[in-house]
Image (spheres, helix red, strand yellow):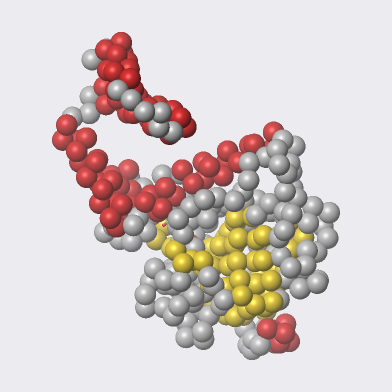
């Protein structure tokens, strides 16, 4: 079909609306359908290819892997990049770089003040202490900020989604005290891979891509009056550090992992050798002229 014929068909479809509906939804869906009609025409997509794709999406939804797919196809990083651009255009600078939330957050983790232990002592990974402060635009410590942290275990699996782990394993919320300090004791995570044989891996295979992420630790950092920060730090030295299938590694989010031992571990109840990461989070003040960093998204809860 030529473009005029496609446009006439689209017009007919759009004109079939007899009720107002939702203007924003109409604009977006009509645009997506138009772009897909053009794609089908330009690439001469066959009916079998179309139904294979539709079936793939249905199965991906059933498997609960759409969040993984969104990360793997770069959508989640793209949304970050757009928010970065909007902030830069509004002259909003500074603060710890954001990076993707990923699909594996679980709401409701136990909260403590100042310090938390994330593991239950059964994970054979290397002991990790991560500590630092939450700072404001002026570099002043922020009391009563909330640091929500979650990461994978020594096999690259996340509690809740991996039912073999205890509830909220490697997930905690830590409130900063008056000194703005947070600290946690845990085990060094290893890299994550999308489920082998899953729907995301199936598409990545067709694209000639891998589904690995470098070892990383997720954070939401929030405080009243400040823009919520969604970010991660990466474990330096991971072979996938700059080859993340979700494109989330960024300069400024790869802190040094120090080797520590002895007295350094005492405040955290840690003995012997351990890995130590010092990392401060910087928040920027909320502003009404820049889109919010609070994202509406269905999230697991336990
Ligand atoms: C995915 C997994 C993660 O652990 C993460 O942080 C982001 C994305 C994923 O499988 O898409
Ligand atoms: Fe993750």
Query: Is 156 located above or below residue 78 in the figure?
Result: below
The picture quadrant where one finds residue 144 is bottom right
The image shows residue 160 at horizontal and vertical percentages of: 42, 71
- Give the residue at x 30% y 23%: 16
Seen as rendered, the residue at the extreme front is 19
70 or 254, which lies in front? Answer: 70
State the residue at coordinates (44%, 80%).
166
| Residue 238 in the image: above or below residue 8 | below
Residue 184 shows in the view: no
At a point 64% along the width and 55% down the height, the residue shown is: 229
Tell me the quarter of the image containing the N terminus: top left
Left or right, 48 with respect to 165, comes to left
* In-image side of 31 versus 106 (left or right): left
Q: Looking at this rendering, what residue extends furthest in the left direction?
A: 48
Q: Position of residue 138 (x, y in %)?
A: 83, 54
Counting from the top left corner in percent of width and height, residue 129 is at: 64, 76
Q: Position of residue 92 (x, y in %)?
A: 73, 41
Q: Taking the image as four quarters, which one is ligand 1 found in?
A: bottom left
Q: How many marks?
A: 0
Q: Who's the residue at 65% across and 61% down the image? A: 221
- In the rendered image, is residue 91 in sight? yes
From this view, report whether residue 78 is shown above or below residue 144.
Answer: above
Is 120 located above or below residue 154 in the figure? Answer: below
Q: Nearer the viewer, residue 288 or 209?
A: 288
Locate residue 131 relative to residue 148 in the image: left or right: right
């Amino acid at each position: 079909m030529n473009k005029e014929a496609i446009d006439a068909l689209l017009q007919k479809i759009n004109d079939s609306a007899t009720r107002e509906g939702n203007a924003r939804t109409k604009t977006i869906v009509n645009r997506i359908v138009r772009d897909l009609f053009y794609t089908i025409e330009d690439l001469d997509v066959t009916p079998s290819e179309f139904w294979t794709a539709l079936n793939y999406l249905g199965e991906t939804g059933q498997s609960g892997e759409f969040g993984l797919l969104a990360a793997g196809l770069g959508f989640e990083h793209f949304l970050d990049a757009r928010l970065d651009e909007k902030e830069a255009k509004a002259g909003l600078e500074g603060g710890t770089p954001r990076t993707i939330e990923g699909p594996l957050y679980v709401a409701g983790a136990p909260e403590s003040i100042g310090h938390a232990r994330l593991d239950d002592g059964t994970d054979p990974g290397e002991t990790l202490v991560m500590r630092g402060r939450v700072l404001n635009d002026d570099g002043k410590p922020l009391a009563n900020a909330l640091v929500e942290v979650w990461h994978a275990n020594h096999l690259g699996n996340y509690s809740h989604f991996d039912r073999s782990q205890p509830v909220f394993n490697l997930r905690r919320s830590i409130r900063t005290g008056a000194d703005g300090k947070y600290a946690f004791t845990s085990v060094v995570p290893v890299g994550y891979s999308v489920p082998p044989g899953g729907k995301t891996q199936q598409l990545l295979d067709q694209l000639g891509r891998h589904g690995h992420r470098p070892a990383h630790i997720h954070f939401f950092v929030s405080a009243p009056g400040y823009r919520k920060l969604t970010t991660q730090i990466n474990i330096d030295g991971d072979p996938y550090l700059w080859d993340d299938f979700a494109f989330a590694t960024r300069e400024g989010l790869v802190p040094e992992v120090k080797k520590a031992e002895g007295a350094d571990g005492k405040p955290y109840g840690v003995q012997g050798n351990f890995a130590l990461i010092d990392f401060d989070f910087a928040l920027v003040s909320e502003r009404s002229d820049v889109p919010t960093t609070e994202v509406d998204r269905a999230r697991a809860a336990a």
